[in-house]
Amino acid sequence: MSKIESAALQHRSVRQFADVALSEEQLRTLEAIAQATATSKFMQQFSLIRVSDPELKRQIAAVTTYDYVAGPGQLYVFVLDQARNVRLVESVHGDLHQLTNWDALLGCVFDATLAAQNMVAAAERSGLGTVYLGSVLNDPRRMIELLHLPRYTFPLLGLKVGVPADVPAIKPRWPRSAVVGVDKYPHIDAEALRDYDTTIKKYYAGRATNAKDNTYTQYIQQHLVDSMHHRDDIGAILRAQGFDLPQ
Ligand SMILES: Cc1cc2nc3c(=O)[nH]c(=O)nc-3n(C[C@H](O)[C@H](O)[C@H](O)COP(=O)(O)O)c2cc1C
């Protein structure tokens, strides 16, 4: 197996980082890699905010509810961004629909997500650890305020990157047969799903920190009753930011 494959297959999210700042050169390389990523329709629809102010980091950590976000490790926020494109054309073109509709929003999500993952892959290949922070969506309005985000932008995803202080066990994924189909949707094999429940139960029980007694089915069941209703207004916030989406 090549070194690159082995880094990719060794992926695990890292949430504890050593108190070692990444150099300006390391950060600029990671940022350049994010920018070099393929971009839907060549529209370059994301911005990247490097968080350097410790107080701002603390305030973003409060949005995520995770203390480790305020600790060591570089914090970034990936922002969906049509503001630059709107700026280029709004004085000559009244109808901005094609920059603000669902297709444009998906373009932003593709660009920001792929750029983030390119950064993650590069960081992991160089021995750094990373964790995504979808939890910035706990309070997008607060994120918009904290980061001074203009109209036609939206804070999609946080990312921490740094020197790992802890290397967690790899989280087992579905068996290949449950996920990969040839020419059609993969066959749902009840036995494979049951086996995976057992695999995850063992993984959770044997984990060094935050051990628990859960199957994967129980984990998904828990998600149904977790209180996530504060995220129901993401659509309304996107509309308020200028995205032209149906109710
Ligand atoms: C879009 C996205 C958002 C995520 N948000 C968070 C988060 O807010 N906090 C966190 O601790 N982990 C977050 N994660 C990490 C996942 O929990 C993690 O990838 C998953 O549990 C699988 O574990 P692994 O990455 O170690 O394989 C996120 C991952 C993705 C892809």
Image (tube, grey):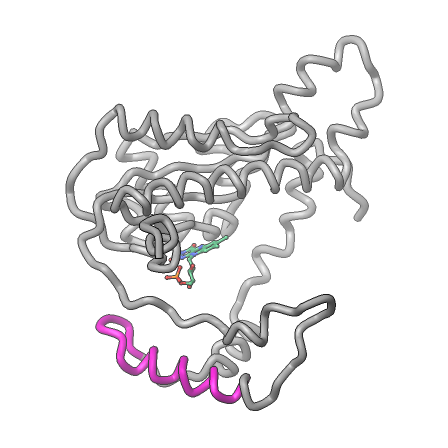
Horizontal and vertical percent for residue 79? Answer: 53, 35
Segment tinted magenta in the rendering: 193-211
- The answer to whether residue 12 shows anywhere in this view is no
Q: Main secondary structure of the magenta part?
A: helix
- Determine whether, in the image, residue 114 is placed left or right of residue 206: right
| Residue at the image point whose x is 58% and y is 75% from the top | 178
Image quarter for ligand 1 equals: bottom left
Q: Relative to 16, is 58 above or below?
A: above
The residue furthest top is: 92
Horizontal and vertical percent for residue 196? Answer: 47, 82
| Residue at the image point whose x is 66% and y is 40% from the top | 238
Q: Quadrant of residue 191?
A: bottom right
Position of the N terminus by quadrant: bottom left
Q: Is residue 208 magenta?
A: yes
| Residue at the image point whose x is 29% and y is 55% from the top | 15
Q: Relative to 16, is 188 above or below?
A: below
The residue furthest left is: 19
Q: Quadrant of residue 163?
A: top left
- Determine whether, in the image, residue 8 is placed left or right of residue 91: left
Count of numbered circles on the image: 0
Horizontal and vertical percent for residue 75? Answer: 34, 39
Camera-side residue: 191 or 28?
Answer: 191
- Determine whether, in the image, residue 59 is placed left or right of residue 41: left
- The answer to whether residue 34 shows anywhere in this view is yes
Q: Relative to 63, is 207 above or below?
A: below
Horizontal and vertical percent for residue 142? Answer: 49, 40
- Determine whether, in the image, residue 23 is placed left or right of residue 135: left
Q: Is residue 173 magenta?
A: no
| Residue at the image point whose x is 48% and y is 77% from the top | 219
